[in-house]
Amino acid sequence: MKLRLRIASLSAPLIALAISFGLSSLILLFIGKDPVETFQIMFEYGTKGKSIVSIINRSIPLYISAIAVAVGFKMGLFNIGVEGQYLMGSLIAAFVGSQFSIITPIHILFIILIAVSSSALWAAIAGYLKVKKGIHEVISTIMLNYIGTGLISYSLTNIFDEPGSDYELPRTPELPESGKMPPLNNLFNLEDLQDLHGFVFVAIIVGIFYYWLVWKTTLGFDLRITGSNPVAAKFSGINPNRLIVVAMVTSGGFAGLVGLGPLLGYFHRFTIDFPTGLGFAGIGVALLGRNHPFGMAVGALLFAFLERSSQILDLNDVPKEIEQMMQAFILLIVVVFYEIIRRFIVKQQIKDASKKVET
Amino acid sequence: MTRMKSKWLVLFIVFGLILTACGGGSDDAAEEEVVAEEPAEELDSPATTAAAAEPEADPASICLVLDIGGLGDLSFNDLAYSGYEKAIADFGMEGTFLEPDGGGENRGELLELCAEAGNDLIIGNGFLFDASMNEVAPSYPDINFAITDGVAEPANVRGMLFDHAEGSFLAGVAAALKTTNNHVGFLGGVDFPLIHEFEQGFIAGVQAINPDIVIEIGYASVAPDFSGFNDVVKGKEIALAQYESGADVIYHAAGGTGTGMFEAAKEVSESTGTKVWGIGVDFDQYYQVGNALPELQEYILSSMVKSVDVSIYNAAKQTVEGTFEGGILVDNLESGGIYLSYSGGYIDDIKDTIEEYKAKIIAGEIDPPSARP
């Protein structure tokens, strides 16, 4: 019985994937393109060596962002502010990290700590506002994103800008060599490909840590029980206010790691070109992966694959916007199917229970 | 029940956000990186298959990677695209154009994509391509690269620069001669050094005629927020405020945002009965905006034309002829790549003075400042 339920819940993302491929094919047919050929081109391009490295690199921040969102989701808290939190953390970490030089492991650890604590602090504001002023975290985190963007613009131009640089745009000074995370290419014999970010290890550790935190600790238990039944949680002695702040800060702490893959592995400074939108993309990945560390990893890799492989489409006269539609299809359909399956499971459980009562 | 409802409401908000995130920046995850040492790989793209099929009549190919904003910005990108289109038509080239999504972090990947597909000329439209040019171009020494408004180190990259301050100086001269209130305005798209070149040149031009003229300065956004190049509503708001405070000529360096300025000029002129003017940028906007929106044409005093299209056309021509060279190419009043347009005939009466200043700048007697003091 339990196995049947597990298969049922696993089938949701697969069905969603199949349907969204079907819908995308219809759209491709509608605009006069051959869907089979299109997906074939995407697949061929997306599985080349360079593409695979690119996909792994892209999926690192997506995955960590999803985890940051999922920590909140677990207790029914919507942290929409991962976007602002990670940008804030990345900027401060990029600047502070560029100011000194020590041996690489300590330097990188220090940059990580700075990023995590600045992002966590920024997220704590939303937690405070919710607990003390009753402002819903969706509203406050969205507003904090706007405020964060403004603050980042201002401080990048006026405080953190590289002194004496005649570059067109404001940017922080470059990290010294000791602050750059070495790529993993030598480890995996990938000499002729682009850098594989060393931060992939951190992402794996973060995934394991998230699992341990949510499923193996008291805090995680409190989070989950509050998420599934806040009233029961309150009566069982969990202090919801404390938990909201702790969850928000933890979520923000994870968010601090989102920008570090690109920062330590590629950009080595905060610039205008620094990737944005990862915080929002993480919400989708968390939804797709059902807040499960493994599910989100698959989701992050899937989205990274779609993004990378769709780049080839413009060269083949297929609008690559089809990929964005596919992502949206997958998300919409998966949510619908998760709900259908949840109802199915509840029905099954009621049936089983009533059977037991009868016998 | 209410709890369920609010949960769905929140979910809807979240979904809206995800969708906007998907639309606006799904490729933002794309960073990067291209350090390609390996030879160009064969791709099943039309360019290579076509080339393989008819080795003798191999048409030259051009790949244009546009900047943020993409096609339809009525400005920088459209201008580049028109040069690219003309080159394709005139030289029978094969063309591909790509648009980076969202933040446009995947510039390097797109340049490399063009290179792998075997294009002969690859153009990165905008100075943000400089870092990616440095990474990609050295791996493809046989391919010509060009970057607008920027420079890159590799020998096969041409940096196509424009002296914005010189042209803007003349726009300032024209504005100062045309204002009846001794009050003019400047509308910048994004507040960052590149646009300061327009701003400073304009101010110097105005003050060369009359240092007592009041100059209003407004920007639609501050870097790193680049929305100010494509925000017609904001452009109109800022321009309305400037006109209402007394300015009667405004010069814009704001891309698509500038359309809002012309709209404001029409509105103010009609409501007050006194005509106010706008000066366009990049394109000869008397025709470009005027053709799209004829009702605005009569408010377009002149335009500071920046011939990105000609630069791209020339790079394509030289690629076809085999005479393309890397390095830095500066277009200015002397080369004719920058000029003040007389379309519409509204500044024909002050042509002598403008030409006089133009000659002085070319002769080096006047050197318009391009950076803020």
Image (tube, coloured by chain):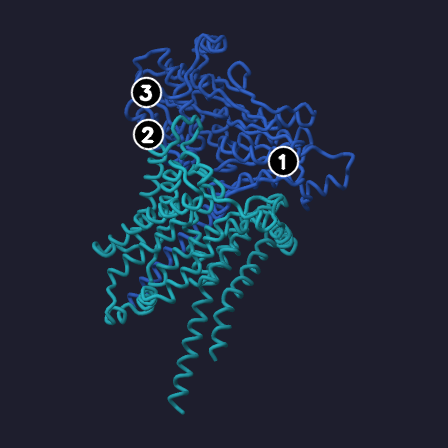
For the residues labelled 1 and 3, the Cα–Cα distance comes to: 48 Å
Q: Secondary structure at mark 1?
A: helix
Q: Circle 2 is placed at which residue position?
A: B240
Q: Of the residues tagged 2 and 3, which is closer to the observer? A: 3
Q: Quadrant of the C terminus of chain A?
A: bottom left
Q: Circle 1 is placed at which residue position?
A: B139
Chain coloured blue in this rendering: B
Kindly indicate the quadrant of the structure image that contains residue B271: top left
Q: Of the residues tagged 1 and 2, which is closer to the observer? A: 1
Sort mark 3 into few (<14), some (14-19) or many (20+) by Cα contacts within 10 Å: many
For the residues labelled 1 and 2, the Cα–Cα distance comes to: 50 Å
Q: Residue at x 38, y 42 (%)?
A: A93
Q: Secondary structure at mark 3?
A: strand
Q: Position of residue B28 (x, y in %)?
A: 47, 45
Q: Amino acid at mark 2?
A: Leu
Q: Amino acid at mark 3?
A: Ile
Pick whichever of labels 1 and 2 is earlier in the sequence: 1
Q: Taking B96 as reference, is A261 left or right?
A: left
The hue used for chain A is cyan
Q: Taking B64 as reference, is A339 left or right?
A: left
Q: Circle 3 is placed at which residue position?
A: B215
User: Are discs 1 and 2 located on one and the same chain?
Assistant: yes
Pick whichever of labels 1 and 3 is earlier in the sequence: 1
Q: Position of residue B340 (x, y in %)?
A: 48, 18
Do labels 2 and 3 touch, CB within 8 Å?
no
User: Are discs 2 and 3 located on one and the same chain?
Assistant: yes
Residue closest to the eye, A78 or B220: A78
Q: Amino acid at mark 1?
A: Ser
